[in-house]
Image (spheres, helix red, strand yellow):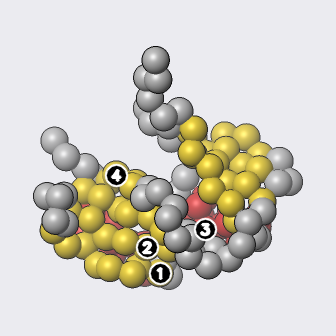
Amino acid sequence: MIERVSWLEIKVTDMKKAIAFYRDILGLKIKREWSYYVIFDLPGTITFAIMLGGKRGRKEGAPNIYFAVENLDEEYEKLKEKGVNFIEPPKKQYWGGYAALFTDPDENLFYLVQKED
């Protein structure tokens, strides 16, 4: 029986640019690194990795990926100042959560979501 999702990877076209985005802008820590693959350390969650390959641009039908934060409004402002491309500012979602939508340099979509108590 499947217990949980354990690994999530996305494809990027420029590894140096992607590493700079995820490490330097989003603040994720690198756990392991190769020239074509990088694993980031997200304690207590699934493993998040980037892999060289794929195409630049929005991927239709790709799953939604949510990064949870303690204070969405504060993180939104910090990341906006660092140049993160937000498609939607923080807002109440139809499903009840509070989230903002952004892209990485390859236009992969991500939600930044307020952590629920």
**Residue for badge 4:** 68
Which one is in front, 83 or 35? 35
Which one is in front, 64 or 42? 64
Report the disc number at residue 21: 3
In this picture, is 8 found above or below 113?
A: above
Q: Amino acid at mark 2?
A: Phe
Tell us which disc is closer to us: 3 or 1.
Answer: 1
Q: In what element is the residue under mark 1?
A: strand
Query: Are the residues at dot 1 and dot 4 in contact (C-beta closer than 8 Å)?
Result: no
Which numbered disc flags the more N-terminal residue, 3 or 1? 3
Q: Amino acid at mark 3?
A: Phe
Query: Are the residues at dot 1 and dot 2 in contact (C-beta closer than 8 Å)?
Result: yes
Disc 1/disc 4 C-alpha distance (Å): 17 Å
Which numbered disc flags the more N-terminal residue, 1 or 2? 1
In this picture, is 57 found above or below 100?
A: below
Report the disc number at residue 102: 2
